[in-house]
Image (cartoon, rainbow, N blue to C red):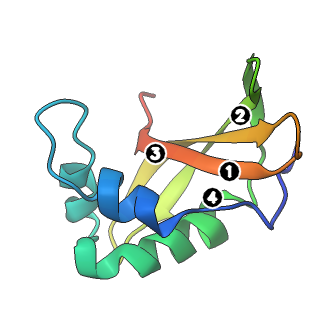
Amino acid sequence: MKLSGQAVIARAKMTQYLLVDRPENDKSKFLAGLGYTMEQADRLVEDVRKQLLPLDAELIEKTEYGEMFRICGLLTGANGRSLKVASIWMQEHPTGLVKFITLYPAKD
């Protein structure tokens, strides 16, 4: 299944979460390895939209808020390096709007 190409990918998700060094569940280090820094937040948004969103999505959970999907694929970063990642998306029940939730290195 393909998710809507009009999915919401909030820049704040990058600048206030993914690209921030955290003591637990840190994602900034693997993203830095792909060349993404705080200054590259807009590039990360665009790369997620262009490289991951068009790929097939797998339904992983139905919640009271909406359906959760996982899209796995290769993310080629700002420095040209690539890493297989998993991204999580939610399609909200009331609006049908698809939103980007998170991103992490794939485990396979």
Callout 2 environment at 10 Å: few (<14), some (14 to 19), or many (20+)? many
Whole-angstrom CA distance, mark 3 to mark 4, is 10 Å
Q: Which amino acid does label 2 sit on?
A: Phe
The residue under label 3 is 103
Point 26% across, 81% down: residue:
39
Secondary structure at badge 4 equals helix
- Position of 76 with respect to 80 (left or right) is right
Q: Which amino acid does label 1 sit on?
A: Lys
Q: Does the rendering let one see residue 79?
A: no
Whole-angstrom CA distance, mark 2 to mark 3, is 12 Å
- Position of 93 with respect to 68 (left or right) is right
Pointers 3 and 4 in contact (C-beta within 8 Å): yes
> Which of labels 1 and 2 is toward the front?
1
> Which of labels 1 and 3 is toward the front?
1
The tag earlier along the polypeptide, 1 or 2, is 2
The residue under label 2 is 69
Point 64% across, 72% down: residue:
50
The residue under label 1 is 99
Whole-angstrom CA distance, mark 1 to mark 4, is 13 Å
The tag earlier along the polypeptide, 4 or 2, is 4
Callout 4 environment at 10 Å: few (<14), some (14 to 19), or many (20+)? some
The front one of 60 and 14 is 14
Q: Residue 52 carries which label?
A: 4
Quadrant, the C terminus: top left
Point 55% across, 76% down: residue:
46
The tag earlier along the polypeptide, 2 or 3, is 2
Q: Which amino acid does label 3 sit on?
A: Leu
Quarter location, residue 14: bottom left
Q: Indicate the position of residue 24 as horizontal and vertical percent values.
A: 18, 30
The tag earlier along the polypeptide, 3 or 4, is 4
Q: What residue type is labelled 4?
A: Leu
> Which of labels 1 and 4 is toward the front?
1
